Amino acid sequence: MSDPNQEAIRAISEREFCGAIIKGDARATDAGLKADWFTVPICRRIFSAALAVERQGRPCDLATLEGVLDDDDLDKAITIAAETVTTALADQQADNIRLAAMRREIVKTCLETARTANEGEISTTELLDGAVMRLNALSGQTDDRGVISGTDAICGFYTRLTSGAVEPVAKTGFPKLDRALMIAGGKLIVVGARPSVGKSAFLLHLAVKALDVGRKILLVSCEMGADEIIGRIVAQKSRVSSDKIERHELDDSEIVKVAESFAEIPSEQLFISERGRTVRDIRRMALRIRARCGLDMIVVDYLQLLDAGQKTSNRSEAVGVVTRALKSLAMELKIPILTASQLNRASERNDSPRLSDLRESGSIEQDADAVLLLHAPEEKESPERLLFLDKNRGGECGKIRLYFDGATMRFTEMQGG
């Protein structure tokens, strides 16, 4: 029995890809797809018509499709094109269509092999040879776009190099850190700290900085609900104590400040998930958001609360599965992923934390592009925080002194930091 969710995703992929073809952002002849791989009838007919038009040397659009599709199909094509929100994911949609077709063919091959085996009319050797031949034929239809030639890599690199300065997704607001750390591309950035030091607040600080410059953020929280997250953002913006906001103990002037802060929060750019428990969950949400309106950064709070999604022999191995999956997702989506990590208790006895203080540190050290370690001095009530940039692939490391106002969840750089 087929999975209704998978069928729905496949149908969306087919409609989105056909919309991209009609809008001129994808070509049917370049996709490496076959018409019979499309399960939605109108999409199969649109794709076949697009192939015919492009093979005649003409661009595929609504005008050229008019002479190939009948009036009813043309109306449906117009609707599909109008409903296609983004065409930037055309390659991803083509991959979805290809993989779904491959899975159907694999299931079909296995069922036919099982039926023939039960009939017992041919030898086991012939049965296996036939199955292997059919599966090998399928493997030849897989996509090879994951392989990039050296020439293409050099040309791509030069094009990007000469296209202007790289803009970070967000700046931290701390000049010294911004000079050293570029939050951009497919980076995995980890913020480590002991409990109650402010690592969740620091992640939220970075997310808000990105929102303030127009970025679209997916914030996955494994321990806070949407109300608490919004409450903390409101505290940052309004400078009203988060405790008072949480307890609804506001005087008239504070209510006004909170209400006015709503206008400063670009809510249409923020997406919050309370249910992401595996990287697969996060990937699924990210792809849907990106297809709908684009996505610039993912923030995950926090690393050790994510489930590996598979059986592992110990906690260290499970964290390794998670960190590798997060890094792979960042590279796939070409956007930075920021996450937090617990530090072990030994870090409290040191003047400064080290990479080895990260819980299950081996995989985190290896997979992260940058590691920031947030440290509180011995005086527990002190608002001072030390932020150590202890790993920075391709950049310099260093230390800055921060002031943390726990009431309003605000970080500022201290003089002489």
Image (cartoon, rainbow, N blue to C red):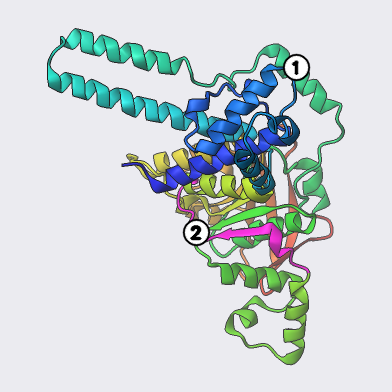
- Quarter location, residue 376: bottom right
Query: Height in image: 235 above or below 316?
Result: below
Q: CA distance from mark 2 to mark 1?
A: 41 Å
The reply to whether residue 367 is in sight is no
User: Quick check: 222 left or right of 19?
Assistant: left
User: Quick check: 215 left or right of 75?
Assistant: right
Identity of the residue drawn at 56% across and 65% down: 196
Q: Is residue 340 magenta?
A: no
The residue that disc 2 covers is 222
Front residue of 358/241: it is 241
Q: Position of residue 174 (x, y in %)?
A: 80, 54
* Range of magenta residues: 264-279
Mark identifier at residue 154: 1
Badge 2 amino acid: Cys
Identity of the residue drawn at 35% across and 25% down: 106
Front residue of 395/58: it is 58
Identity of the residue drawn at 51% across and 32% down: 97
Mark identifier at residue 290: none
Badge 1 amino acid: Ile
Camera-near label (2 vs 1) is 1
The reply to whether residue 250 is in sight is yes
Query: Height in image: 202 above or below 233?
Result: above
Front residue of 385/83: it is 83
Label 2 environment density (alpha carbons within 10 Å; few <14, some 14–19, many ≥20): some
Circle 1: element type:
helix
Query: Which sits earlier in the primary sequence, circle 2 or circle 1?
Result: 1
- Quarter location, residue 326: top right
Total numbered badges shown on the rendered structure = 2
Label 1 environment density (alpha carbons within 10 Å; few <14, some 14–19, many ≥20): few
